[in-house]
Image (cartoon, rainbow, N blue to C red):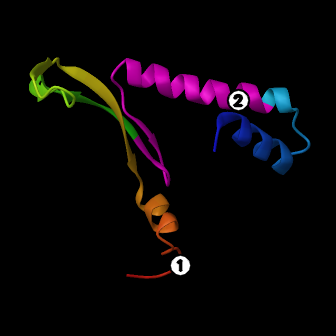
Amino acid sequence: MTKSELIAELSAAHPHLNARDIELIVQTILSEISSALTRGDRVEIRGFGAFIVKKREARQGRNPRTGSAVTVEEKTIPFFKAGKELRERVNGLTGRKS
């Protein structure tokens, strides 16, 4: 699902809201998540999951085309960990007791 598809679905589900307002809300939420990750903060949305920033150490890699050794610098990457409720819904386990 793309951002424009999300906005269209939300607009259809909430016809009393203006599409521009929905677009602003979605953009604001995504912007705040991005800002928090840029600061190195963790963003947790209960029932959905958590966005965190992980650090990858520098390492020696290989160029897949030539096979020569390449130095890969240290970097930070955004990482998403799905929450339990989301994992269960995706796996079709909602409503079942373990």
Q: What label sits on residue 4 in the rendered view?
A: none
The residues bearing labels 2 and 1 have C-alpha atoms spaced at a distance of: 31 Å
- Classify the position of the N terminus by image quarter: top right
SS of the residue at dot 1? loop
Where residue 72 appears, as percent x and y from the top left, is 16, 20
Does the residue at mark 2 contact the one at mark 1 (Cβ under 8 Å)? no
Identified at 27% across, 23% down, the residue is 76
Q: Quadrant of residue 38?
A: top left
Percent position of residue 10, x then y: 77, 44
Question: What range of the chain is rendered magenta?
Answer: 22-50
Residue bearing the label numbered 2: 25
Any magenta on residue 27? yes
Q: Is residue 26 above or below residue 46?
A: above
**Which circle marks residue 95 in the picture?**
1
Residue at x-position 17% and y-position 19%: 74
Q: Residues within 10 Å of mark 1 (few under 14, many from 20)?
A: few
Q: Element under label 2?
A: helix
Residue 78 position by quadrant: top left
Q: Position of residue 42 (x, y in %)?
A: 37, 33
